[in-house]
Image: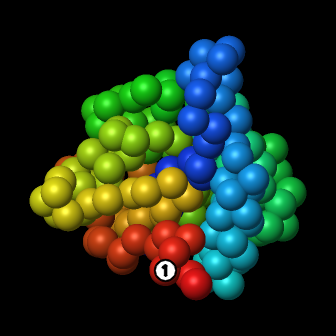
């Protein structure tokens, strides 16, 4: 069994004076990421891997989540996640190491919503990932390379709002 947690980065600054890639989290983003991290700690414990976009806001979100989870391994920085569509994101998932049973993927919309809908077989209009939201999918598969459209079991979305 494989578990994939698709986590959109937390709330960011609205402007991008140094470019979109460099946008950082707002205070609310830090708070929301910590709340989601605490929730994940109680739900899944410590994951086997955290793979994040190289954009500042995603890296910051991943670092906060890792701290909340007591995750002691290095984060995997994956530049292909930034601005990726569903096909590229699926390739990233298929390349995950098979000894990692639970993985948190941290990145961006619209690609993350597209990936979650495709893997779960849900209608794209039914998958919404606001900032700091996490979708949980489970796969009854031995290898990540076997993951494909409609192979995941949808276990729901958690947002900072639903935790309050």
Query: Percent from the top left, x then y, of residue 150?
Result: 19, 58
- Can residue 18 be seen at all in this image of the molecule? yes
Is residue 66 placed above or below 88 in the rendered structure? below
Estimate the x, y position of residue 24 in percent, counting from the top left: 70, 35
In-front residue for pair 35/67: 35
- Residue in the picture at 55% in, 58% down: 132
8 vs 141, left or right, is right
Residue at which label 1 appears = 162
Residue 130 point in image, percent of width and height: 43, 57
Tell me, yes or no, if residue 47 can be seen here. Answer: no
Q: Position of residue 94 (x, y in %)?
A: 41, 42
Residue 33 versus residue 41: which sits nearer the camera? 33
At horizontal 39% and vertical 57% (from top left) the residue drawn is 129
Query: Is disc 1 placed on a helix, strand or loop?
Result: helix
Q: Point out the residue furthest to the left here.
A: 123
47 sits to left or right of 137: right
Residue displayed at 16% across by 57% down:
125
* Image point (35%, 39%), residue name: 111
């Amino acid at each position: 069994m494989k578990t994939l947690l698709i986590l959109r980065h937390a709330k960011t600054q609205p402007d991008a004076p140094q470019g979109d890639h460099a946008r950082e989290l707002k205070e609310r983003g830090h708070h929301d990421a910590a709340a989601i991290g605490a929730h994940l700690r109680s739900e899944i414990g410590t994951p086997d891997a955290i793979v994040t976009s190289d954009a500042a806001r995603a890296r910051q979100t991943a670092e906060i989540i890792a701290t909340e989870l007591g995750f002691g391994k290095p984060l995997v920085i994956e530049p292909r996640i930034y601005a990726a569509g569903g096909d590229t994101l699926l390739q990233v998932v298929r390349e995950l190491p098979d000894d990692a049973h639970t993985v948190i993927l941290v990145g961006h919309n619209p690609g993350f919503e597209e990936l979650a809908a495709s893997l779960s077989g849900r209608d794209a209009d039914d998958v919404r990932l606001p900032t700091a939201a996490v979708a949980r999918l489970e796969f009854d598969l031995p290898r990540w390379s076997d993951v494909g459209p409609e192979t995941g079991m949808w276990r729901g979305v958690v947002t900072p709002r639903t935790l309050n």
